[in-house]
Amino acid sequence: MKKVVVIGGGPAGMMAAGQAGLRGNQVILIEKMDRVGRKLFITGKGRCNVTNAVDQEGLIANTPGNPYFLYSAFYSFGSDETMKFFEDLGIPLKVERGNRVFPKSEKSNDIVKAMEKFVKSSGCKILYNTEVLDIVLEDGKIKKVITTEKKEIECDSVIIATGGLSYPNTGSTGDGFEFAKKAGHSVTKCYPSLVPLRVREKWVADVMGLSLKNVGVKIKIENKEVYSNFGEMMFTHFGVTGPVILTASRYINDRINEKPILEIDLKPALSEKELDARLLKDFKKYLNKDFKNALDDLLPQKIIPIIIELSKIDKDKKVNSITKEERVRLLNVIKNLKLNITDTAGYHQAVVTRGGIDVDEIDPSTMESKIIEGLYFAGEVIDVDSFTGGFNLQIAFATGYLAGINC
């Protein structure tokens, strides 16, 4: 029997603690907040997208941040294992569009409660409202941890599962990075990822809340395309968000100072020639009306005043007097609506942290440190990250599993 301390009561920490406990170890899970799973509770807009029902190669393909480090983790505990794990805990699941997996109840709290029960039933003790102040080493090995009120807990292994920097209100404030650095580990530069984007244009506030489906987006830096996709987005008072934007942020969060430009195609299903034919058709229908009343069939009502202003066509001009040159300008705005990205919305709105403890210093088959015997890592604290769709939680469960069975 080993004495194991797990730092952090998120998905990775709870999985690690439970698995370690099932193997007969004496396990203490330390959580600095008043309850476990606070970030897990808010994932998937409160519905908890626990994994993505693709095979291991699909998981790798959706992980831009050091994917090959995760081969052992994904093949040891992939999405099938995650789904079976929760169903065995009495949580029925369902698979939705994009292979995203949710509890049938659509309540993230059911997932949190099930994991907390799993941890406790494995024999693990949970300390709430307790913060780790230091990890003490002796001769390159784990000796003990010191918690608040200077309490000392002797142990053989420590699993750091403290999360990254995203959603700091849930307790993810980078503690694990400091513990790792003190133990001799390197931490790569960190960025907020899967995060809304701020833009320079003030007009976005006028269309705040407008959701656009089936739009095309491109991001260019110095006129070179660095990202393109098709999907759903939404305007906010400071910029843009939504699935296609969150994914886009992963490609530019380290290049914000290079002044990226977002180009939105409001009608990607139509070529410029087809859109021009559609405009002519609508203009014929509204021939004697003012221009401001001629786009209702083509665009959402909320964005029409913006499109008209950007096209530089007089909103009160009669449709029958709009010139070909003006129509071409309008077409260009609809197919190429530009926004200047100035920043991300930061860690408070980021789904995940890009960056973390250098994977070259961690054994990918066990999650053990290559520097300190008995020190393990799991979840977002490691320099691995994926796209939206349940992939990041799958990383947490898979790395937590490996750390838990090997500690």
Image (cartoon, rainbow, N blue to C red):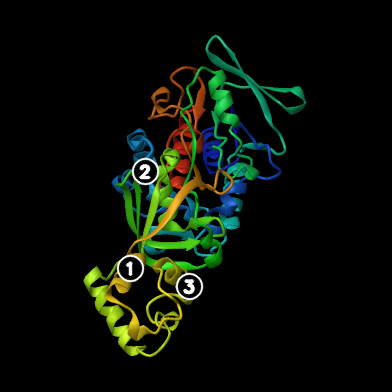
What residue appears at the point 47 percent right and 77 percent down from the top-left corner? Answer: 301
Q: Is mark 3 on a helix, strand or loop?
A: helix
Q: Which of 35 and 219 is in front in this view?
A: 219
Q: In the rendered view, would you say 364 is above or below 313?
A: above
Seen from the viewer's position, the closer of residues 275 and 93 is 275
Find out whether the residues at labels 1 and 2 contact each other: C-beta distance under 8 Å: no
Q: Is mark 2 on a helix, strand or loop?
A: loop
Comparing marks 3 and 2, which lies closer to the viewer? 3
- Say if mark 3 contacts mark 2, CB within 8 Å: no
Quick check: 61 left or right of 306?
left
Depth order, front residue of 344/144? 344
Read off the residue under disc 2. Answer: 63
Mark 1 / mark 2, whichever is N-terminal: 2
Residue under circle 1? 329
Indicate the amino acid at tag 1.
Answer: Arg
List x then y, in percent, for residue 209: 54, 66
Are the residues at dot 1 and dot 3 in contact (C-beta closer than 8 Å)? no
Residue 305's disc is: 3
The residue carrying pointer 2 sits among few (fewer than 14), some (14 to 19) or many (20 or more) residues within 10 Å by Cα, namely: many
Tag 1 secondary structure: helix
Say whether disc 3 or disc 2 marks the residue closer to the N-terminus: 2
**Quadrant of the rendered structure where residue 45 is?**
bottom right
On the rendered image, what quadrant is the N terminus found in? top right
